[in-house]
Image (cartoon, rainbow, N blue to C red):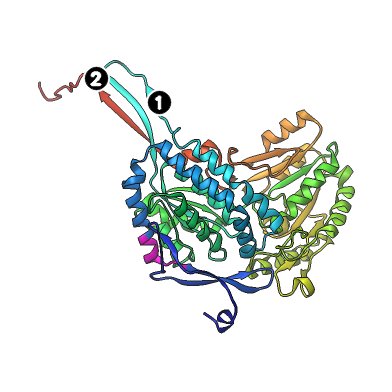
Amino acid sequence: MTAAVQAVQLARYEHLFIGGEWVAPEDGGFIESIDPSTGRVWAVAAYGGPRDIDKAVAAARAALEGPWGRMPGHERAALLRRFADLYRDNAAELAMLETRDNGRALRETRVDAGGHHLGYHWWASLADKASGRTIPFDDSVHAFTTRVPVGVVGAITPWNVPLMAAAWKLGPALAAGCTVVLKPAEQTPVTSLALGRLFEQAGFPPGVVNIVPGYGRDGAGERLTAHPDVDKITFTGEGATAKAILRVGADTMKRFTFELGGKSPHIIFADADVEQALNAATNSAWTLCGQSCALGSRVLVQRPIYDRVVEAFRARAAKVRVGPPLDEANHMGPQAHAEQLAKTLSYIELGRQAGAELVAGGKRLSGGIHGEGYFVEPTVFANVANDMRIAREEIFGPVAALIPFDDEEEAIGLANDSAYGLTAGLWTSDVGRAHRVSSRIKAGMVWVNTYRFIRWSTPYGGFKGSGWGRENGVEALDAYLETRTTVISTTGRFPDAYAS
């Protein structure tokens, strides 16, 4: 640990949560969590290594084969509800911690964290609903199916929305009766460790939930992915990492859920309520500091209203208050870490070099209230071609690319001309067009005359390079269950094939 870190008062989270106990890392150490609004360390957290993962997986397996595995669904539901109520009571603190850890504006984290408990309650309502079916055959056998937990789950969460991502994985996994080893991103370990206290207070049996922050390659993440006693990996993050996880995990035939990137089209037709569309399109470009795979970063605009939309984006970008995220007067905080700041700025330069018209933003903000934080102006490029890198690659920063189109067919073609297929949005007053276009968009979730409406009950996931499987909805519960078929003879007789 550096002398500078030792010289200031830091928040300290120096233990891992394994087997219901708070333990020192066995072969890990301590992570310095950087406050991205200042560029300085604000907390020190424990991180685990391969031996810590081994201990966590062993604890999860023991819980699965012990009290948790024998617990009826309604009792699991009661524990989940107790946890949900504790989450509700601690939501304000959790929101504050997430803002310190990743720089997302407190006005956003308060709203998100303030509603997560409702999702946990919804998952609790499904904890005793995993029923099978009877299969008719004839009166010689009785055939039926049962749904059983997939087993020990390794849940790997990202740095942009660590609390939300944890909820989307822990909720269905625990409702299904699985046990979990949660590995949050090394840049944002604090909120996940804080969740461990709530699971402890709720009275979950030891080992049901284990929390081990750590690094990916050659660390906790790689060991979790390769571990032979982990049955499923659920990962939210970048596509290249998912491919590496798949290669390592394939040796033990794990199950996978991947929620990956997006370059979502947000289509505005000339017949839309343009003001409402602008409200949604500007918000979805810059909320979460632009650091979400679901944001409508490609704004496709029909030519009759294109100039109006470009001017509105320029004017609205100037109104976005960018500053310290703990000040709830500010709309947007910094990029979550130094590497992401550099990436965002590099893509802005690529947009300039490609010939796109920079109409707003484009610079890092520093000095004054911004200090040495990782702040970037809300940025707008106009006259973007869909083959430019700023239109094809996920930037994960507050950068909107405005692309003109002429007609419905061109809009659909542009929307689908992407390696991704996570979300999409469209605005129109023509109900026929709404049905025609939404049915042809290659995306896992399509919003019509709204955007980013995501709830625990609505399945969320992508086509193409945006992932495998779904999170949220009953579809997510299915991903944590296996189907067992049982056939029972009603006669007890089996013929001797070699009698004659």
User: Looking at the image, which residue is at 74% across and 33% down?
Assistant: 434
| 152 vs 133: above or below | below
How far, Cα to Cα, is label 2 from label 1? Answer: 18 Å
Amino acid residing under circle 2: Thr
Name the quarter where the C terminus is drawn. top left
- Residue 354 in which image quadrant: bottom right
Residue 467 visible, this angle:
yes
Q: Could you tell me which secondary element the residue under label 1 belongs to?
A: loop
Percent position (x, y) of residue 419?
Answer: 63, 50
x 72%, y 31%: residue: 436
Residues 279 and 303: in front is 279
Q: Amino acid at mark 1?
A: Arg
Residue 211 placed where, x, y %? 46, 58
Q: Which region is colored magenta?
A: 47-55
Left or right placement of residue 361 versus residue 201 in this view: right
Query: N-terminal of the two: label 2 or label 1?
Result: 1
Q: Could you tell me which residue is drawn at 21 percent across and 18 percent down?
A: 491
Q: Secondary structure at mark 2?
A: loop
What label does residue 133 carry, if any? 1
282 in the magenta segment: no
Image x and y of residue 262, in percent: 64, 51
Q: Position of residue 392 (x, y in %)?
A: 69, 54
In the depicted structure, whether residue 28 falls above or below residue 316: below
Residue linked to disc 2: 490
